[in-house]
Amino acid sequence: MRCLALLLALLPCPAARAAEEAPKPTGDAIVSPDARLELLFTRTAPIKGGLTEGPAAAPDGSIYFSDIAFGPDKGMILRFDPKTRRTTVLAADSHKSNGLKFDAEGRLLACEGADGGGRCLARWDVQGKKRAVLADRYLGKRFNSPNDLWLDRVGNVYFTDPRYLGDEPRELKHEAVSPDGAALYVADHNSGSEHVDRGGPLKHGAMKVYAFPLGRDGLVNGPRRTLIDFGAEAGCDGMTLDRRGNLYLAVRSLKRPGVLVLDPTGKEIAFIPTGPSQPGAKSPKGIPANCCFGVGPESKVLYVTVDTSLYRIPLRVEGPAAPGRR
């Protein structure tokens, strides 16, 4: 978060070792058992805590992602260039950005969280490095902490608004879309932080992924169904889809950290470990936060944010089509 022209070095770290220790992938139709996660970036900036999040492929093939910090540090939005393998800074103050996604016009949409962040949905002109707030309220009340988002084929934006961190007064009490636009997938990662602003106790809640049917207008038009229930284990954080409609979940389970691939019925068809099994670990490593597909020549490459690093791995399937114009 210092100079916008800062170049960040690629250094070995515990996250790199975690990937090396991970078991082989499963699901030959999705990923080769010999494929391995390739380390691309590890944080070197003097940021305390937090994690990398929200990878998003730009039209030029570069990958933008958030480096989230805890406390007064505002975090950064970074850009990895697959051609040069260099990572540079788009924004030294990300306003606590989390999930990122590019729209059909090549503008970067960002979910900005609480804990001193923007608490809004913002849009970046990545060429001019200019930021604008698109929405920060619902029915006149401030969002809790926008977390992640998805765009459908006609440009509708869906985003989640939970509350995990921050002591800002909470005004709202309410806390991805299939390639054919027929379903909306939502991860319920309930860490028990509902009353975090009042110092209440943390109580583990639901760790599930739901599927909601969508109508032609982009609105939910039927009952939800549970695609997967992680039970007592930590569940899914970010997710993405491939061209076939399979769902890729960044699973934060200590027993089985990695990217879990489900078909639209909820059946497991592949698993990409990002770290070793470590039940009960107090300092876990190799825990993924989010994932996205590359574009163009890298349409069969999955990028994954793990701990404070960025990785990629080649797959045998293509990612989703880019969102269309309205």
Image (cartoon, rainbow, N blue to C red):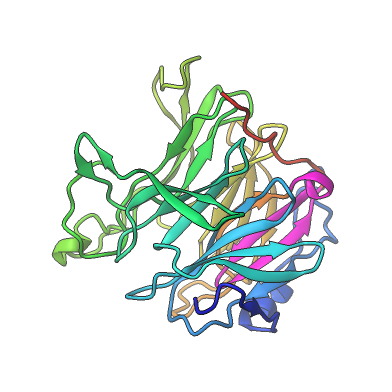
Question: Along the line of sight, which residue is nearer the eye, 268 or 321?
Answer: 321
In the rendered structure, does residue 292 fall within the stretch colored magenta? no
- Identified at 44% across, 79% down, the residue is 282
Looking at the picture, does residue 113 appear above or below residue 218? below
Question: Along the line of sight, which residue is nearer the eye, 320 or 129?
Answer: 129
- Identified at 80% across, 44% down, the residue is 296
- Identified at 50% across, 71% down, the residue is 279
The residue lying furthest to the front in this view is 128
Residue 318: which quarter of the image?
A: top right
Residue 68, position as x, y percentages in the image: 46, 68
In the rendered structure, does residue 309 fall within the stretch colored magenta? yes
Task: Please give left or right for residue 187 compared with residue 56 in the image.
Answer: left
Residue 204: which quarter of the image?
A: bottom left
Residue 183, position as x, y percentages in the image: 52, 26
Question: Along the line of sight, which residue is nearer the eye, 129 or 65?
Answer: 129
- Residue 179 visible at all: yes
Write the start and end of the magenta stretch as one range. Answer: 295-315
- Residue 234 visible at all: no
- Identified at 64% across, 83% down, the residue is 13
Residue 181, position as x, y percentages in the image: 57, 24
Looking at the picture, does residue 186 appear above or below residue 43? above
Residue 226, position as x, y percentages in the image: 45, 34
Question: Along the line of sight, which residue is nearer the eye, 286 or 310?
Answer: 310
The residue lying furthest to the top in this view is 216
